[in-house]
Image (cartoon, coloured by chain):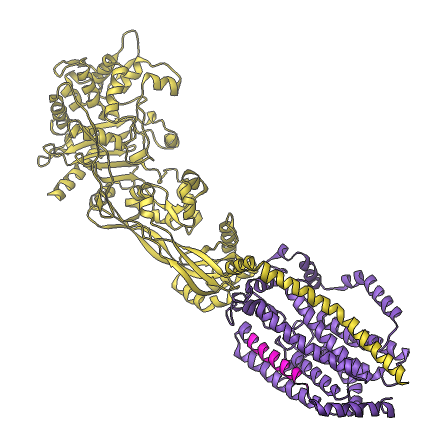
Chain colours: A purple, B yellow
Amino acid sequence: MRNSPLSFSVNLKIDKSQNNSSQFDYWILFSIIFLCSFGLAMIYSSSNSLEMTIRQGAYFFLGLIGMLLLAFSNFRKMEVFYLHSFWPALFLLIIVLFFPSENSKTSRWIDLGLFTFQPSELMRFILPISAASFLTKNLKTKMKDMWLVIFVTLICFYLVVIQPDLGTSIIILLAGLLPVVISGFPWIYILFGGFLATLSLPLIWMSLYDYQKQRILTLFNPEADIYGAGWNIVQSKIAVGSGGLFGKGFLNGSQSQLNFIPESHSDFIFSVIAEEFGLLGISILFLIYGILIYRLLMVSFYSSNKFAKIVSGTLSIILLAYISINISMVIGLLPVVGMPLPFLSQGGTALVVNLLTIGIILSLRKEV
Amino acid sequence: MSIFDNKKETNETYRIVIFLSPFLILLFLASLQILNLSYFNADTFKTQSESNRLYQSKIIPQRGFIFDSKNTLLVENNIQQDLEINPSFIENPRIFLKQIADLLELNLNKIESDFYIRATGKSPNEPYILIKDLNEKQIAKLSVNLKKIKGAEIISSFSRNVIHKEIMAPVIGYVGNISREDVFNNPELSQFRSLKIGKTGVEKDFDSILRGNMGYRIQERDSNGKLIRNISLEPPIKGKDLRLSIDLDLQKKLFSDFKGRKGALVAIEPKTGLIRALISSPTYDPNLLNTINDYEEVKNLFADKDSPLFNRALSGQYPPASTLKPFVGMAALEAQTISWEKQITDSGEYYVEGDERPYKGWKEGGHGNVDMKKAIVESSDVYFYSLAYDLTINNLSPFLEKFGYGKQSGLTENEAKGILPSRKWKLGYIGEAWFKGDTINMGIGQGYITATPIQIALAYAALANKGEIVKPRIIEKVGNDSTEKVSKLSISLSDNKNWKRIEEALLGVVEASNGTANNIYDRSIRIAGKTGTAQVKSIGETEYKFLREDESLRDHALFVGYGPVEDPKLVVVAIIENGESGSAVAAPLVRKAINLYSKNEK
């Protein structure tokens, strides 16, 4: 138990050292603010819609407040709340299947009148915290608990797959399984699980929707159907490539300004950045992402608290997964799945959730 | 405990790094791919991105106008609004066509068939016109709704409008799309695709002048085909205007006398070779073909057994009949096988030694004793049978050739040559030796010989010019430049007085009481001319075969004349198919033409 005298004394010691340095990680805060502001500019550039940009700006503002509130909250007191917030998240995940927002083909959104939000986004945020909390309730994690978390994760995964939302379902899988494997799930089981997953690939292939299969096939030969399924990839590659070293300039990317890139303001926003700011812009973007992830990982590495380690580790990996998968898919390395670029892509729920994630990690930092 | 805790913590950090690494590797691969795209292949993608949004389109030049000799506008270009579609922007053709059909209240089936017909042979990026000549209501509806329909646009274009339609059709001709065959014949045309070129008449012969130069426009468009802005513009250059030698007034008044009868008329200024009137009947409305809106109508036009599209004045090959007699006479005078004074007895029939068959004259009982002048005035057949027999084909054909028989007139490449038979010709085309009887028939312009109306007119122009042969022209001015008279070789006779004497004989045809065209005698303007009655059964060109089958076998009426004889201003030939008598129906037309023209000239 974390309330043991030992861990208390450790915490006390670190608290002292933290008082010397900064209580708050400004590196993280500034990279977040930079990324989000840059994202707003790119959303404006690719959508030419001030309304959409302002809307995203409002989410950013809300998310930022939420992040700061979490960052300064007493994490210890919140842990029980996180543990049990899994249940309402699961409830919403089920609800969305029955009452999806009407103006969408998939049942991903819940319409709350004023705005819509994605329960799957909420779940991929709640699941790792709640799982970590569950797994660390005993000093030594019990195998039984691990199996239970795996089981619950698979249920959530399934619920998101049938929405259908392949991209987020992958993230859900990571969100639930990473706490398990980080907290010490035996390697032999992990390897066996990976082996099983590989075997079931044909089965997964068969269960995919035609459009999903098409996306995967397109990856290997996008030029086969330039005006059909390959359109996204081909146009997005043209955008990235034509950006060259220094890009075409803000609001000057012909590919995005003339709508050759579909979903340019959301999932494909990276190609707009590449087109308008070139290799130089991408390098700066990578640098900022690098700083952010490095600082987040440091929280995990330096934390002596197992719960904090698992949560910040999992959330950091998920963030990196989002970034790497999104970029790979935009430049044609991975099939097109619905996966936004963190802090940059348009999408209110994702932005708020990402900001809250950072807030959690910042609050865990105090646990170091 | 503390050691155990520490070990466990490192184990977790270790695991975090392990599960982080796949995504780091992925990001590393992505970086390589980005470098590949935007550094090593940037130029390729830059070009692709340019071609993605830039569209080059042609701007069709306005075709030159055509005026008559008095600067009356004959052919203009109407501006019309068409619906142009770009197939590469159409996502679902069925839905697209349904939307268009509903909006314009048009028949969906017709639009669909047009869509597929016109799309064939074009690249998917090439825009083309789906619906021509939109009316105001359609334009209003479209301009409101077009934003919602991808791949369609209203564009203005020109449609060729021949103002006097049927009257001018044989002269002007019509325009149409460039066919594969056109490009094959003239590879230069391939750059003018989507332009209309002249298919017949002046439109065809002077196409390169009327056509003008293409303009080009480079436009930036978005992925939906919506125009963003014009990048560059090279304006088209309008084709040059043409001024024809045709006198619209004259043409109109003469045309009205055809009253739907089949035939042709050519009126040429003998001194200049300028054609003042050119009529072919029946005719057609060239605007039907200039803007094909109804394929059925066009099909009917092409299938019409009276072949209205056929230019009889330039390509109708008729036996010259008695109009040839003055030339046969002159040939005999040149060969000295006859003199002006020598008389031949015409008893109505002519016999060749050793042949029982009679060659009949048109007049029962004959003309009695006839000399050359009387033979021309009364159109004695027997006299010319005898002349031709003595002359032989070897002397006759070369002489007729000098007057342009058997050769194109040089007005256009698309006219018939007629047939000037010779021994060689008959052997080659018919596969038989030449018989004396063939020469006898040819003496009265029958048998194998055929000529086009314009050839006959030019031969008589040479008579009016006393030997000077001029090249016919139908264009007076190209832009601001006048065309010049071209005269070919002059024909010289052994006795130049013969020109005058032939003219006197031709005057007699009209002015003598026994003249065959005495009915058009008019003291004020003296006309020299010759009647002719061509036997239908001897018409022998492929285009005309069906005419023989379908129409009655009545003879064609011919008259050719020039006047005023003191200073010939106009040579006119008129042919009325199945008109029976040249003097009754054709001669009055010639008289009318010369009278009208002479009065106008004063």
Query: Closest to the observer: A77 or A288?
Result: A288
* Picture coordinates of residue A158, whole percent (x, y): 78, 72
Q: Is residue A27 above or below residue A242?
A: below
The answer to which image quadrant residue B267 occupies is top left
Can residue A4 be seen here? no
* Picture coordinates of residue A150, whole percent (x, y): 84, 75
Q: Is residue A323 above or below residue A137?
A: above
Specify the quadrant that holds the N terminus of chain B.
bottom right
State left or right for residue A324 relative to residue B361: right
Can residue B521 be seen here? yes
Whether A18 is among the magenta residues is no
The answer to which image quadrant residue A302 occupies is bottom right
Q: Point out the stretch of residues depicted in magenta.
A: A25-42
State left or right for residue A150 relative to residue B304: right
* Picture coordinates of residue A259, whole percent (x, y): 54, 67
Specify the quadrant that holds the C terminus of chain B.
top left
Residue sitting at x 13%, y 42%: B601
Residue sitting at x 51%, y 70%: A249
Whether A30 is among the magenta residues is yes
Query: Closest to the observer: B392 or A197?
Result: A197
* Picture coordinates of residue B328, whole percent (x, y): 22, 20
Main secondary structure type of the part rendered in magenta? helix
Residue sitting at x 65%, y 82%: A27
How many numbered marks have been drawn onto this rendered protein structure?
A: 0
Query: Closest to the observer: B226 or A253?
Result: A253
The answer to which image quadrant residue B209 occupies is top left
